[in-house]
Amino acid sequence: MDDVLTVPAPVPPVGLSSGPLGEVQAADREISRQTARRARAVAAFAATRPASADRAQGEPGAMSGERWAARAEVLRPVSEWAAQELVVALSISTEAAEALLERSLTLVHRLPSTLEALEAGVLHPGHLWPLLDKVAPIADDAVRASLERDLLAWMAGRVTTPAQLGDKVRREVLKRDARSAADRLARAIRERGVSARPDRVEGMSVVSALLTTPEAAALVAALGAYADALPADPADGRSRGQKMADCLLDLVLRPGETGLAPVQVVLSVIAPLGALLGGDQPCEIDGQVVPAETVRALLAALTGHPLVATATATQAEDAPADTAPTNTAASAGRHALGPIEVPVWRDVAVDPEFERWWTETVHRVLIEELAGRGAPSLDPAKVEAAWTADHPPPDPASPTRSDTPPTGTEDGWWARADRAVEDAGDAVLAAQQALGHAHRLVATAARADAADETAWAHSPAGRVTAAPDALTALGAATDQARQALAGLLATTGGGGLADRPRIVLTDALTGALLTLIDLPALRRAGRAGTGLSTPGPTDGYRPGAALDRHVRARDRRRRFPGCRRRVPRSGELDHAVPWPAGPTAAGNLTGYCTGHHRGKHQAPGWRHTLAPDGTLTVTTPTGLTATTTPPPY
């Protein structure tokens, strides 16, 4: 039983090579181990510098409310001065010290398995950014731990670059935490804009544009098409990137002076059936993972088929009566961005920690007040002297002082202290009421959120998202959604689309591509009863159109280990067994980028072996092997 429950230790994807390359690998793994060791040490140091030693919010000299609110949550329990100690100890900037603190605390407290994998050499520091950026912020501890565990298991035994891990992380986060991802996307869209900053080279600047993924992909594709359309000139020494930059300037700064002809942009959009029917399944645009809402909005804009369906009264009735939200805003859709308010209240006890802090604060303020006033003893003469020193006689010329202050102890320092105590009591009462109100708001929001989530889960969109296969998703969708999907599939090339939408038939267990087909061909196959199959071999060196589409849909990205570039739209499909000895068939074709394609044929000592199912095994001159398989859908 102990053996069954024992979790195997993480193992690096490849063994150690011999010679200098092996030394490089060993050094890299030691860097990973020391990075993990540093993270643990920084977290231990942070634990010795609690924020309770700092001045509390609202006190004179405390950190500004704006800075405090912008601070990462994991840094809230840590003194703001801990970063300054790291600055002195490590000779780094304050920003770098804050980042090191945040990263270390996040790894130790929110991603412990990632930290263990880093110590074991399975990960290197470059792998950390997608996990820290996408997985660590997930609020649900169980969801975060499960996703972290599955990602590390997915990396086991395979060569994985940070970019590949980032792509996998984005896809899985959209599957498991789609609601938070949609909220982050909505906030990011509001931050769209263009900015410029100086480059490292004097006289150069970098212009950055924060755009949605479809906008960015279309912009880059259009600039590339404009650059490729320029007349060929042997004397023109500009690279393609330089030509794209010049076209951008011409189109923006001199729109009426250019002779550039309009170009057509081609974006590859991959959307699961459920996403087109209103579900939350992640999609792709030119290989970049995007939420389903983004693809539905893009396709609706291009084709005129509205794929974004809002919840209707009929859908809301599908939710159980005892869990349906009582506010219309909560039933308007799972990703409604407006505030949700449900008028349900309950009494909440005052937080003991807050009460203790407030009592100590009032006590300290009173002591400082009395000490600052030089509180005398209760001797009447000294009390009178203190009053006279603290309250000079009124100015007869002043219209605001018409009566003389009374003498005696009733309005002296003791009376003022008494009033301060009363004011403090009023403040405590107001704070208790505000804290109770805040607790009630949090509880109300949590109940409204749970009701909203339950209502969405029982709506057609929720049932489509939870559907285990495409047929179940079709059965759970509304008639309107099915009609919109049929209209999209019937759309031919031209207009907003460069090609006819095609259906990807995949293995239900592995996600591997079985065949690629469009709606008319599917209808013909259904009437003829011929079934579906992979396109057959092509006579000649270049594959036919159907076979070419099939191989590109199967591979989607270049198949060399670690390469994430898209397979070019023309060329670069390599014959594993050179033609004509090997056929031009799906089992003998692989997608490469130009550099890796050249390396396959020219780099000495390398071996590339392709299995009939598309599995590619690459062996280096030193004997290391890495295997890639076509990415599942």
Image (cartoon, rainbow, N blue to C red):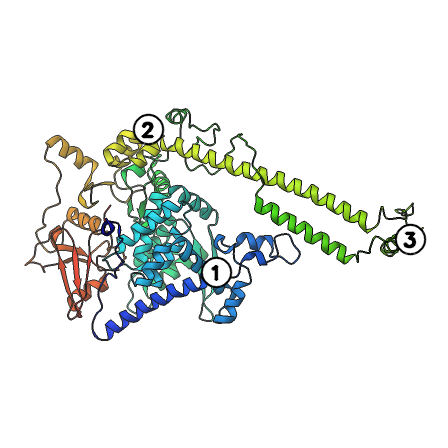
Q: Amino acid at mark 1?
A: Ala
- Residue 145: image tag: none
Which of label 1 and label 3 is nearer to you? 3
Instruction: Describe residue 447's horizontal placement relative to residue 472 as left or right.
Output: right
Crowding at label 2, few (<14), some or many (≥20) Cα neighbours within 10 Å?
few
Image quadrant assignment for residue 309: top left
Judging depth in this view, the residue of 613 and 519 nearest the camera is: 613
Image height check: is 27 above or below 511? below
CA separation, marks 1 and 2?
Answer: 45 Å
Marks 2 and 3, the one that precedes in the sequence: 3
Instruction: Describe residue 87's horizontal placement relative to residue 408 as left or right.
Output: left
Q: If the image is split into quadrants, where does the C terminus sit?
A: top left
Residue ID for mark 1: 196
Secondary structure found at label 1: strand
Q: Amino acid at mark 3?
A: Pro
Crowding at label 3, few (<14), some or many (≥20) Cα neighbours within 10 Å?
few
